[in-house]
Amino acid sequence: MDYDYDLFVIGAGSGGVRAARMSAALGASVAIAEDRYLGGTCVNVGCVPKKLFVYGSHFKEDFEDASAYGWSGSSPEFDWSVLRDNKTKEIKRLNGIYHNLLTSPGVEIISSKARLKDAHTVQIAGDTVSADKILVATGSWPIVPEFPGSQHMITSNEAFYLDNFPERVVILGGGYIAVEFAGIFHGLGAETTLIYRGDLFLRGFDKGVRTFVFDELREKGIDVRFNTNIESIEANGHERIVRLNTGETLVADDVLCATGRNPLTKDLGLREAGVATGSNGEVLVDENYRSSVKNIFAIGDVIGRVQLTPVAIAEGMCIAYNQFNDENRRVSYENIPTAVFCQPNIGTVGPTEERARELYPRLKVYESTFRAMKHTLSGRQERMLMKLLVDEDTDRVVGAHMVGPDAGEIIQGLGVAISAKATKADFDTTIGIHPTAAEEFVTMREAIR
Ligand code: NDP
């Protein structure tokens, strides 16, 4: 049977773009449909603009710290529109790069919504095309819980494009996005309150890391409230009156909702094509990302597993090489290194200490907390945390956790060591780079637990 394309990809985010362009490079005829923006969440309203905002927001402390190093002068003023618009310019540049990444190997870009009609047919803008294989890579979308006035909240989508920078912000949630934006808004000068429903935010991360970050955020002046939730929000002109379940009321200019993201599968025609989905709408797939329909695949946020760009990219590579180069690649979901760009940053790889205790009965914990050398002169009280988890039976380093500037940069390297099953003895014989914070990871000699 002849089809218009070997592969039709729905969604040009991190995973879809990688699968499309690698498949095309391997000789497949490929089309990709995207109705929003090339590059998906990561490039447009996620990782990239977020990191630019994190850089922008850290200058406040840098200017303050500079005086101890001899720098003086009038204190700089922040102009939100400059940061916002420069960021948007950079994103437009990246959209162009993504366009070229797709067209160079011959992928056809279709700027329209695509909907499955059946297992081999896709509907696009009043037309239909056929494909041998179809890949659903439509990503995810912010969840906004329902309560009176919840429609007055913004999500991360809007936070990147605010007309006016808020003087007061309330953030709902205790995950990646909530803590990252708490640092951004606070650093850029907003009075920032973070509301989290549980005892301690960043569930799923190492407990020591979570309490350490809590202390640091509080120390910086972010109002962090646990065991708290929003009951209602009332709009009063530009103001938002936020009523909490504790009986308190907060007044804010913006309320940011960061309560997770659901797979984006609405109106995709999955049911018509016979593709099975789970309770949050995620496409159910096997270890080859094959859905319940054998020629329809799905990767990235839409499969509801790990919502991280590098994971979607790895899954996209698997699709290309396994489907169009006869390989049998697998993504390893073990020991995925990750960073949270709160301030200071979190970098982590391997299990938390709590989980490692269950996995390795004879666990040794090496830990160090200290003030970065830079702050010996600046006087800033910010501290760093470094932690290594070692299985005493094998001497293998099974996990590394860090809170501190550039934690992601440091943990990326340790991720390689941990994947390569490095032992504590390997760490000990590695010469440190002096003076760095990272050398602490090769000089920790005494286990503290
Ligand atoms: P997360 O899943 O990380 O966190 C959601 C938070 O919202 C949790 O604290 C959760 O609480 C809370 N929550 C959920 N439902 C409600 C509710 N109804 N009322 C109040 N609180 C609620 O989601 P994010 O939105 O922060 O981020 C989405 C995903 O995007 C992340 O999981 C991550 O995979 C990815 N991401 C990655 C980044 C990175 O790599 N640096 C940066 C940003 C996002 P509880 O813990 O109690 O469930």
Image (cartoon, grey):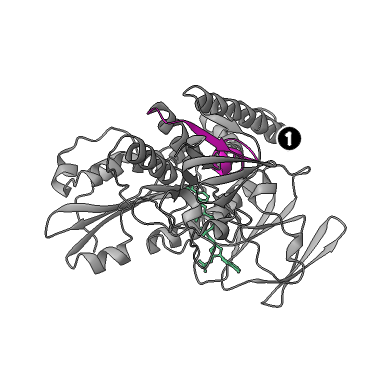
Q: Is residue 206 left or right of residue 265?
A: left
Instruction: Give residue 221's quadrant in the image.
Output: bottom right
Q: Quadrant of residue 446?
A: bottom left
Secondary-structure class at tag 1: loop
Residue position for label 1? 79
Magenta-colored stretch includes residue 371: no
The residue drawn where x is 18% and y is 37% is 430
- Residue located farthest toward the top when viewing the structure as drawn: 104
- Residue 101 % position (x, y): 50, 26
Verify whether residue 32 appears in magenta: yes
- The residue nearer to you, when weighing 38 against 371, is 38
Which of 240 and 308 lies nearest the eye of the viewer? 308
Kindly tell me whether residue 71 is visible in this rendering: no
The part of the chain drawn in magenta is 26-50
Residue extending furthest toward the right: 237
Measured as percent of width and height from the top left, residue 5 is found at 49, 35
- The percent coordinates of residue 290 (x first, y second) are 40, 52
Evaluate whether residue 285 shows in this view.
Answer: yes
Question: Residue visible at 13% across and 46% down?
Answer: 425
Quarter of the image that includes the N terminus: top left
Residue for point 38% across, 60% down: 206
Vertical arrangement, residue 255 with respect to residue 299, above or below: below
The foreground one among 386 and 144 is: 144
